[in-house]
Amino acid sequence: MTGPGSLPVTGFPEPGPPRFESIAAVRTGLAGIDYLADEGIAGVVYLADRLAKPVLVEGPAGTGKTELAKSVARLTGSRLIRLQCYEGLDESKALYEWNYKKQLLRIQAESGRGWEELEEDIFSEDFLLPRPLLEAIRSPEPVVLLIDEVDRVELETEALLLEVLSEYQVSIPELGTVRATGIPLVFLTSNNTRELSEALKRRCLYLHLDYPDVERERAIVLARVPGIGADLADQIARIVRSIRSLELKKSPSVSETLDWARTLVVLGVESVDADVARDTLHILLKYRSDIERAAKELAGGAAGT
Amino acid sequence: MVPPAPDGPGAGGPPAGPPVGTAGDGGGSAMIAVLGRFVGELRAAGIPVSMTEHLDAAEVLRHIPLEDRPALKSALGAALVKSSAHWRAYETAFEVYFALRGDGYAIEGEADGEPGSGEDAEGRAAGAGDGGRMGRGRGSAGGGGQGMTAEELAAMLMNALTSGDEAMMAAVARQAVARYAGMEPGRPVGGTYYLYRTLRNLDLDAVLEQLVDGRRSGDRGGQDGAEGGGGDTPQAALTPLEERLARDEFRARIDLLRRQIEDEIRRRLVADRGSEALAKSVRKPLPEDIDVMHATRDELVALRRALQPLSRKLAVRLARKRRHGRRGPLDFRSTVRHSLSTGGVPVEPRFRYPRPAKPEIVVIADISGSVASFARFTLHLVHAISAQFSKVRSFVFIDGIDEVTRFFEHAEDPAEAVHRINTEADVVWVDGHSDYGHALTVFLERWGDELTPRTSVLLLGDARNNYHASQAWVVGELARRSRHVYWLNPEPRAYWNSGDSIVGEYGAHCEDVVECRTLRQLERFVGELA
Ligand SMILES: Nc1ncnc2c1ncn2[C@@H]1O[C@H](COP(=O)(O)OP(=O)(O)OP(=O)(O)O)[C@@H](O)[C@H]1O
Ligand SMILES: [Mg+2]
């Protein structure tokens, strides 16, 4: 199938020059823009580039999935194109849509012309409304495509993504196939509320983003909370680890750790003791029963277990 | 410019001698062969690895230096494993297949750089006797101190854990295995046995208390104390919070040490038996394939962890199925909108979605010891998807029976309700041994009138009735009053109707008796029910 000359139509996109020199370079690069990755995360980003494969990032809420894609875009100086998924998302919002109002106007204005001719005209690029996927494919500049919360779309809608993710192209029946000029870095995120299709998972590299370990969380706090001291950041990371080890309804996420840290800084706290913890735990935890449980544990209520 | 990716293993291979037990680190093709066997093992463990993924993994090998084992592990994992629940099984297989690869992992390369090697070799005889034959390199390397005394080892252990120095901990792990595991070539025992022996001798629980005591009495030693920057007031007593954080830190270090010990044992086993044979014997089932009735404590933890996402996914799937299951009335707007791409001809009509009637569920579960976990998982799962039913009522019994629906009604989380069942339900009548006959009879008397032709009854248990009267007619009566009666049995089919199991007697009155040993089987059944 061929399309009009104005659209970039070439063969399978040539892999561009590598974006990263090494895994370590990814890691230090990201750290330079305040995203703290571990070896595993950096390794997958590195591979995504070398293998020209999308990355499926899964994990609990607030562990830096979305932020990873944004940070990689910044690091590589790429444009970030984001497709936010939701239930009911369809082709016309993900890929492209024909601007039917404009088409109708044209049909009315040119009522004297034959349909054949008219059809050619109204199904041309002028009447096309590109949505994020098509936009990412057509973009002349380097792109990071973020398909956020992909588990929210229906299984059938997932199929729409497959062509883009494996061939880096979009077929438009009326126009032809639009192929990417360069291969974009693609990140899909999922909160794991639905089993994604095997076909989708096969096409992606998989990255499970869990809560960071103490060292990484401390570094994240230091990087993201202005004016915080090293001791306090360390203490915060340790207390959060301790709280996550309790079986709670909802463990604190990294964003909640950061909220808590910011609050403590605003309150002028230099060191967290059991009283301070009890008074501020509601920022870290959302459920009343979790807050009570954690407050008790931190005060030594069930020490030695 | 970016340097080309290394094509094969680079210069930084194992320091001395070829690794034992696996293909040499030579060319890429040997590595590809190892990968092939590794993928075979993953499939055998139940991880679905497609052709594409296998090829991706081969591609990964071209870009990641083989000596960088942690990087290789996560990179191959990214290509091969697409679910975090499968990670444990993957990790186990990886450790076996790549046990001897990478810096410091080759069995023969360990004579150098062991802390403590300057120590007097007094206990060398004991050390060599215990571990010398397994670690061939050790025996022949002679020299440095294999044989620390038990006291020296204990001191080094405390030192390593106090400072948190990972390299020193790894050295302790090696010494401990050499000294205590009693590994011998060809011995037909699994790694767990050696692990058990090593850990028993180290007595890490006592070590933890000692470490915490040490911190309590003001010994803040170590390059990075558990209190981080602290240390200005070494004599101040610890607050409970400080003590807790110190304990957490030490516990994390001990966990790391335990993993290092496991690594060391596995490494030696691989050297002795080869990857293939070992992989088979250490293979870990996926959480959804764990036999619920015979799960170990660790496995129960894994099961509990798997249950939440599993039930949430099931709920989402069923909710969607309900919405999209059947065609409802024509959706005019949507049809017209979509017809524009076909020049205004409505070739593809769009429909709204109807809501089929929802069934009522009654769960009656044996919660006596042997089947308690199974009952808990089932109740959790059924209540997690209770929105799919018009009503769910739950009853639990041992020899007495009690309704527990109320526990679930106000619980934000089914796990919490299940916990209350254990502590609050009134299920013992005489002696607390399962009596299906009595429990079912009481059910029929007290609640039998509430069954309707829309009710599906789920009976849960192994039907091991301790030779009490079966009262199987009761099940027949339940079946007459309701729409369906199913029996879910957590025992393998082969054991049914042996000993005091009388599931056949009850099953005769049921629509179906279903074997439900694993979460996978349970999920399938519950999913079809809704
Ligand atoms: N590794 C990290 N380095 C720096 N900041 C981080 C890191 N991980 C998380 N954060 C912080 O946590 C916040 C939440 O991260 P993000 O929004 O990416 O989470 P998410 O995983 O996408 O969550 P959700 O599943 O709710 O969408 C970010 O704004 C960022 O400030
Ligand atoms: Mg997000």
Image: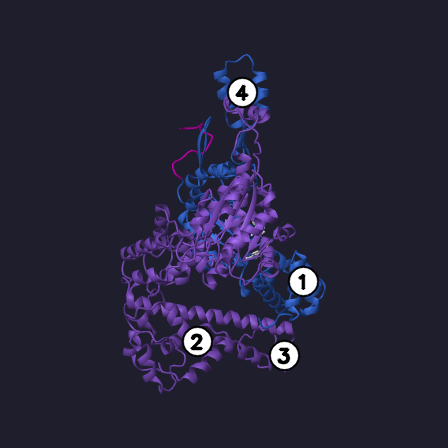
Q: Distance between the residues labelled 2 and 3?
A: 37 Å
* Distance between the alpha carbons at the discs numbered 1 and 3: 32 Å
User: Which chain contains the residue that carries disc 4?
Assistant: B
Q: Nearer the viewer, mark 1 or mark 3?
A: 1
Same chain, labels 2 and 4: yes
To which residue does mark 3 refer?
Answer: B232
Mark 3 nearby-residue class (10 Å; few <14, some 14–19, many ≥20): few
Element type at mark 2: helix
Q: In which quarter of the image is the C terminus of chain A?
A: bottom right
Q: Do the residues labelled 1 and 3 touch (CB within 8 Å)?
A: no
| Amino acid type, residue under disc 4 in the picture | Gly
- Per the image, the residue denoted by label 1 is A292
Q: Please name the amino acid that badge 2 sits on.
A: Arg
Q: What residue type is labelled 3?
A: Asp
In this view, the mark in front (2 or 3): 2
Report crowding for label 1: few under 14, some 14 to 19, many 20 or more residues within 10 A (C-alpha): some
Say if disc 2 is inside 8 Å of ligand 1.
no
Of circles 4 and 3, which is in front?
Answer: 4
* Residue at (57% x, 31% y) in the render: B354
SS at mark 1 in the image: helix
Q: How far apart are marks 1 and 2 (CA)?
A: 37 Å
Q: Does label 2 or label 4 sit earlier along the sequence?
A: 2
Query: Looking at the image, which is closer to me, B503 or B8?
Result: B503
Residue at mark 2: B200
